[in-house]
Image (cartoon, rainbow, N blue to C red):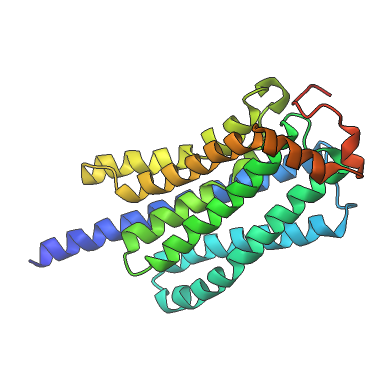
């Protein structure tokens, strides 16, 4: 009996360590992407205040997510639970700032040139909402740690798109740039988790399937709306009368 208990504890510890490594890997992608852009001169700190607020909120979440995984691995579960309530309060800020910066980007430049403007508008907006829904589901299921950590991992993975987008040769990925950077590559983290479950559990935990399915579905819906007559009309109305309207062709293009 003692041996069985010890083996179970070892499995739990190994799983916790795995999710910490995943958190660190996702953090590395995001930090590397933005650092590379800064070093290459494609971005700077001399930007509108909304960018700084957005950075504070999103990097704050990243720091919180990594910290939460460190606390679990080191056995400081009480502090982990306390910070969990901070995470719950942080999610609405993530959604709000994600949508606000999307609108700001579209109204000032028409959005990144390697994305269709309408796809960027709806994909980003529904993407951050899907992140929020997945993260909230993880908090609701916090007592079921197997679901909790997998759902939260997928929620975090969905935020790595901007990091990958700054590391990948985006213009050469047109017309699939959005799906590659925002969906395909980030979901590699979920696939790694599924593979580990298959090896150690003999099956893929359903949390992965629900989370990935929800996140991918949000982008399918986003595209259906974005490329509909209503979606195109909404995009035009969003940029009307702003500098972003100077981008007359909403389609992705080389600069």
Q: Is residue 82 or residue 200 the one in the foreground?
A: 82
Quarter-wise, where is residue 54 in the image?
bottom right
Using the image, determine if residue 72 lies above or below residue 11: below
Q: Is residue 212 or residue 123 the one in the foreground?
A: 123
Q: Residue at x 49, y 78 (%)?
A: 82
15 to the left or right of 56: left
Which part of the image, by quadrant, shows the C terminus?
top right
Q: Residue at x 52, y 33 (%)?
A: 184
Quarter-wise, where is residue 41 in the image?
top right
Query: Is residue 166 visible in this depiction of the protein?
Result: no
Whole-percent x, y for residue 228 in the image:
64, 33
95 to the left or right of 72: right
67 to the left or right of 110: left
85 to the left or right of 9: right
Whole-percent x, y for residue 193 in the image:
38, 44
Q: Residue at x 51, y 75 (%)?
A: 85
Whole-percent x, y for residue 70 in the image:
47, 64
């Amino acid at each position: 009996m003692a041996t069985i208990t010890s083996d179970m504890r070892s499995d739990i510890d190994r799983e916790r360590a795995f999710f910490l490594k995943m958190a660190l890997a996702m953090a590395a992608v995001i930090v590397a992407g933005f650092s590379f852009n800064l070093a290459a001169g494609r971005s700077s700190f001399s930007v509108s205040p909304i960018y700084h607020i957005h950075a504070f909120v999103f990097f704050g979440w990243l720091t919180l997510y990594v910290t939460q995984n460190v606390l679990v691995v080191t056995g400081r579960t009480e502090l982990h639970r306390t910070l969990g309530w901070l995470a719950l309060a942080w999610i609405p800020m993530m959604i709000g700032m994600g949508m606000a910066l999307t609108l700001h980007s579209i109204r000032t430049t028409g959005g990144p040139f390697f994305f269709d403007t309408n796809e960027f508008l709806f994909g980003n907006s529904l993407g951050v909402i899907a992140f929020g829904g997945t993260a909230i589901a993880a908090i609701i299921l916090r007592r079921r740690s197997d679901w909790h950590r997998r759902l939260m991992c997928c929620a975090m993975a969905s935020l790595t798109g901007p990091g990958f987008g700054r590391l990948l040769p985006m213009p050469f990925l047109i017309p699939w740039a959005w799906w590659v950077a925002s969906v395909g590559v980030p979901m590699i983290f979920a696939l790694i988790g599924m593979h580990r479950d298959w090896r150690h559990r003999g099956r893929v935990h359903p949390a992965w399937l629900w989370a990935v399915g929800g996140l991918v579905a949000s982008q399918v819906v986003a595209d259906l709306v974005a490329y509909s007559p209503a979606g195109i009309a909404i995009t035009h109305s969003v940029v009307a009368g702003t500098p972003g309207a100077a981008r007359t062709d909403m389609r992705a293009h080389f600069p």
